[in-house]
Amino acid sequence: SYVYATNGATTNTYCTDVAGWHHFYIGDQVIWSCQGDFSGAPAGFPVVTIWDNGAYYQQTQGPSTPANCSIGLDPGEERFEMERSWNLDFGGGTLNAPYNVRFYYQPAERTAIENAAIAWMATYPACSYSYKYATPLGFYWFKNTGSNYTAPDYDGLQIPGTIGSTVNAINYAQMSGITSFSGGSGAVILVPLALLPVQLGAYNATCNDDLQEVSVEWTTLMENNASHFVIERNTDGLEWSVIGEVQATGNSNSPVYYSFKDYSVRQNETVYYRVKQYDVDGSNDDFGVVSAECLSDQTGFSINPNPAGMLVAIELYGDISNENTYFTFTDLNGKVIKLIDYNTDNGKLINVNLDDLAPGCYLIQMVTDNQTVQMERLIKQ
């Protein structure tokens, strides 16, 4: 009889039928079958082994996690492999290819990883996952070459497989045209949507009245082969001029903070800036426009970006009281989630980490001398 073998079942005993199929068995139970020429195998070989982990394997390739797709970080591939795998040790003998293999597995073992991949895509829509290989539900059979197979490998030499059933209703996949051993399994791999070379966090321009300067500041959450940043200025709403360049870190999976000082615009009430990011291959991306209210005496603040991911910047303008100004983050139920005291020593740009806030809508309130000066709505993604 044919069976779904238990974990670690191994044997070098086989019988051969009239069609040239070698059926490897333990007692009266066949655990694996192969069709082809075994005459080159040394004494005691081939040896077949079936492994069953009891549950499917799963791996997030990284460098980040799927939960961070919403803030632009790359989780890499999401990999699923069947719990059951096979291995054939030819003992270093001479192969006379090709070979055909019948791998006995339970249909639920394949369905488990197909369903797990579907559920994963639904759980993390921000990753925009797709199947790495264009097969039904992304499933494929694969094997390794060279050393004995140790699960999980998740990918390797892909081989075609057809579905069949034995006389006693045991399901198998028949894989054809194998020219090397030792073993493999079935898998599904998900690939996230290709991310931009640089993921932008906070991005602001702020006037510093004491130092007679404007500080253009931005944060990258992730960089991949970034080269440099070009800073441009506009004072009349018409023409842009390049005023500086800042080298990029290049490759990073954690926040990197950048700034550029402009000392030439104090006579202008409103100044506009934009930052362009260049890759090592020469391609570029425009971060958009930010402005600085240099001569304004109105007290208030702005927030950027909005919606926000992991970081948000609060930009202040006007005459701000050092001792009696603070900011509250309140949820829609009126509960204060976060409170930030203002200190003029830190200038007029406050970078706020939002890791402790759940995705949703919040109200940011600026309070000076127990009076609400301004209130803005923030969306946390």
Image: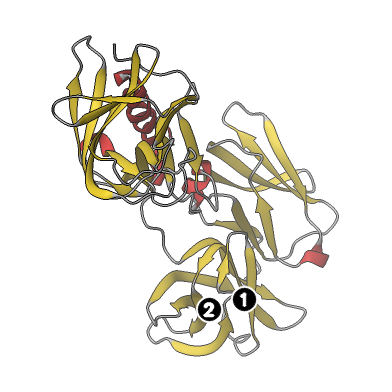
Which residue was labeled with disc 1? 294
In this orientation, does residue 66 appear?
yes
What quarter of the picture does the N terminus occupy? top left
Residue 345 horizontal/vertical position (percent): 83, 66
Q: Residue at x 81, y 59 (%)?
A: 343
Residue 40 horizontal/vertical position (percent): 32, 47
Residue 348 is tagged as none
| Extreme residue in the front direction | 43
Q: Amino acid at mark 1?
A: Cys
Q: Residue at x 49, y 49 (%)?
A: 75
Residue 16 horizontal/vertical position (percent): 23, 26
Badge 1 marks a residue whose secondary structure is: loop
Structural crowding at the residue carrying mark 1, measured as other residues with C-alpha within 10 Å and reported as few (<14), some (14–19) or many (≥20): many
Residue 271 is tagged as 2
Q: Residue at x 67, y 58 (%)?
A: 351
**Which quadrant holds residue 79?**
top left
Q: Is residue 192 above or below residue 22?
A: below
| Extreme residue in the right direction | 323
- Does the residue at mark 1 contact the one at mark 2 (Cβ under 8 Å)? yes
Q: Amino acid at mark 2?
A: Val
In the image, 32: left or right of 304? left
Badge 2 marks a residue whose secondary structure is: strand
**Which quadrant holds residue 312?**
bottom right
**Which quadrant holds residue 86?**
top left
Q: Nearer the viewer, residue 372 or 29?
A: 29
Q: Is residue 155 above or below residue 114?
A: below
In the image, 173: left or right of 182? left
In this orientation, does residue 381 appear?
no
